Amino acid sequence: AERAIELAAAGQWRAAAEGFDRAAQLDPAFALYWFDSGYAHGRAAADAPAGDPAQLAAAIRGYERGLALEPIYALNRATLAMLYAQAGRERQAIETMWQATLDAPQSDLIALNYGALLEAAGDRRAGEAYAVALALQPRSAGAAFWRESAVRRAALEKWQAGQVARADG
């Protein structure tokens, strides 16, 4: 695993992924190797000019194996959700990100990503997820992100109206 870490630090993601794969095979009960493998494969997929479906599939497998061993890490679950989305597995992405919100109910970024997945799917629950993200991180209300779509603008306006009502009440 040490060589894989060095390769990852050098940005050699394919070689790092192979090293983490070997480490995971040698110690299959150690979840971190599976997460490292998934991350390295994901970076290799992202670095390919047109994406790399085989690397993406390997990234998903790595995160799935890691979460089977250590299911409590919300960030790893959220990463898996985004990998599912990248692979076109929308329903799994949404369900997995929902679970991440349950694992980390105080994470504004996970709530925000849950909203983004719902919005991309045309799911009306996106506004509710965005409201949670705003409640968890009110300072984000000034970000351009909230003005980039009708769903986000509506969520922001609804949240702001609630803030005014609380201040008046």
Image (cartoon, rainbow, N blue to C red):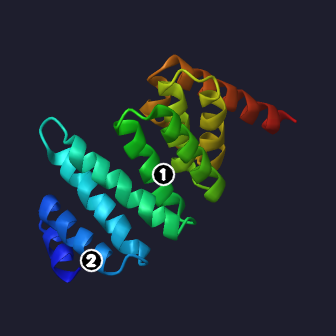
**For this rendering, which residue is in front, 160 or 22?**
22
Residue matched to label 2: 23
Q: Amino acid at mark 2?
A: Ala
Determine the residue positioned at 19% across, 42% down: 52
Image location of residue 77, percent across then percent down? 50, 55
Image location of residue 125, percent across then percent down? 64, 28
What element does badge 1 sit on? helix
Say whether residue 121 is left or right of residue 164.
left
Determine the residue positioned at 43% across, 73% down: 31
Indicate whether 85 appears above or below 102.
above
Given this view, does label 2 or label 1 mark the residue nearer the observer?
A: 2
Image location of residue 1, percent across then percent down? 23, 79
Residue 15, numbered label: none
Q: Is residue 169 visible?
A: yes
**For this rendering, which residue is in front, 149 or 41?**
41
Say whether residue 166 is left or right of residue 136.
right
Question: Quadrant of the image for the C terminus?
Answer: top right
Which quadrant of the view contains residue 168? top right
Residue matched to label 1: 78
Q: Hey, which residue is sitting farthest right in the picture?
A: 169
Alpha carbon distance from label 2 to label 1: 23 Å
Determine the residue positioned at 23% across, 41% down: 53
Say whether residue 76 is left or right of residue 83.
right
